[in-house]
Amino acid sequence: MVTILRARGDRSIRSFIDYERGTISRELYVHPDIFEQEMEQIFQRCWLFLGHESQIPNPGDFIVSRMGTEEVIVVRDRKDKQIRAFLNSCRHRGMKVCRYDQGNNLVFTCPFHAWTYDTAGKLVGVGYGNHPEAYGDTRPGDQWGLAQVAQFKNFHGSLWATWDPKAPSFEDYLGPFTASLRHCLQSSDGEDGGLEMFTPFQRHRLPTNWKVPGFTSVTDGTHAAMTHRSAAAAGLHEDRGQGKAKPGTPFPREMYAIGDHNLGHGGQCTFYNQPGVPDYTDEWFEPGVDDYFRETAGRKAQLYANRVLAPHGWGGGHFAIFPCVMVDSWRIRWYHPHETGMVERWTLCGVDKNAPKHVKNAVRHYVQRYNGPTGFFESDDMENWNYVYPASRGVRARKLDYFFANGLGHGKYDDRLPGVVVNGAYTEEAQRARFSRWLAFMEAKSWDDLYPVNTSKNHRIW
């Protein structure tokens, strides 16, 4: 059992969660010891999202992303054109070898001592490398290349990595959410991997703990009544444009809040109760855009004529991949912790890669007014998140608990998503599932304790 807060009595991590009352101690959000353990126990083990292949289409293209508190270089090799990810830290003295957010390189040269790495991470040169008195017979060899991630996955264009060689495959990590993520990465006509992302990353720096947005976002249905009241009044909450007539016959579906307490994923979920796709609804201001999406929706309807859509995506809700990646059909949002009370939220928004220019422009404009730095929807959430941490870290405030009991005890398993708990659409089932998995990671010695899931030792704590 992992112990923390020795100055407060050697309390175990588990003791900060009251399973019967459905409460979480604020200490889990404000104490630096817990943050450090999260970086080691969770972010050094989990599959983490890095970006999208459309950001680096050409040999030598790179982006600098993050894995927890560390920067990584994601680069397409000039020789074999494969995408790889490396820690952005020179093996000599630890200097950043890349100080740009994105670009195209022949090599990455450390500005400190000129250790130079190719786009496959191999050390190919050092400062004064040919000078006999510089290194002599102690010149570093191939084993001093950039530190590469243990496992890397290109999943239908989305890029993921883990530092842990013992982590399960990415598909096993996703479990029953694999089909949903694949669905969200399809273009509007159902083509696998049919999206490209607008660049660069959208970034917001927030003075709060990473779990405030990371464990609250997605299936926090009750916040919309107040937080997004102005956006709803303006019509932005539901429609990309002026909002026209809805389909005459509703497509049979059920909507829930769901959580996988063994894997930690969960969020909004729509179960579709017949094959096919819902009728397309006109919703765009810009001329010709509805025509395009109506035509692609028709092609997708043919593709799915005898198939039932995967839950989530394309109007079916958004969900979280543990620990803190939020996915839906037009954007991926994820959180990079920096310190106990500081996190960055990064966003990539997608569009059909084969769409005509006027469609891409319309989607880009929608993204900017909805999700961008000057948008008036996502900023509503950030206003709240900015104040949660300082209002929770005081000597008195941190002695109180957070309430996570909405829908507690009412969840049920559903065979349509094996192992996943289904609950009312406004409940906090998804948040509780994330804490179930959080606790499992914080107590585990290695992936041997985490996967395969041992149902006789179910990590569901609620």
Image (spheres, grey):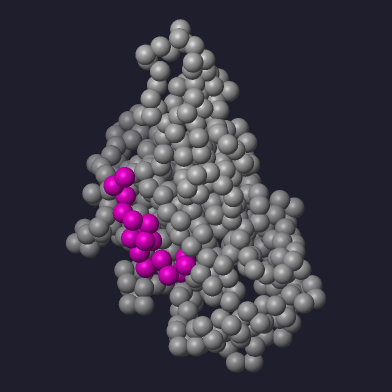
* Residue 175 among those drawn in magenta: yes
Residue under the image location 49 percent in, 31 percent down = 117
Residue 167 higher or lower than 327, as above or below: above
* Residue 37 among those drawn in magenta: no
Give the image location of residue 93, x and y in percent.
47, 21
- Prevailing SS of the magenta stretch: helix
Residue under the image location 67 percent in, 85 percent down = 246
Residue 405 visible in the snapshot: no
Residue under the image location 32 percent in, 50 percent down = 167
Residue reaching furthest to the top = 133
How many numbered discs?
0
Residue 61 higher or lower than 452, as above or below: above
Give the image location of residue 75, x and y in percent.
53, 44
* Front-most of residues 441 and 154: 154
Quadrant assignment, res 38? top left
* Front-most of residues 97 and 380: 97
Q: Which residues are magenta?
A: 165-182
Q: Quadrant of the C terminus?
A: bottom left
* Front-most of residues 460 and 76: 76
Q: Is residue 132 left or right of residue 355?
A: left
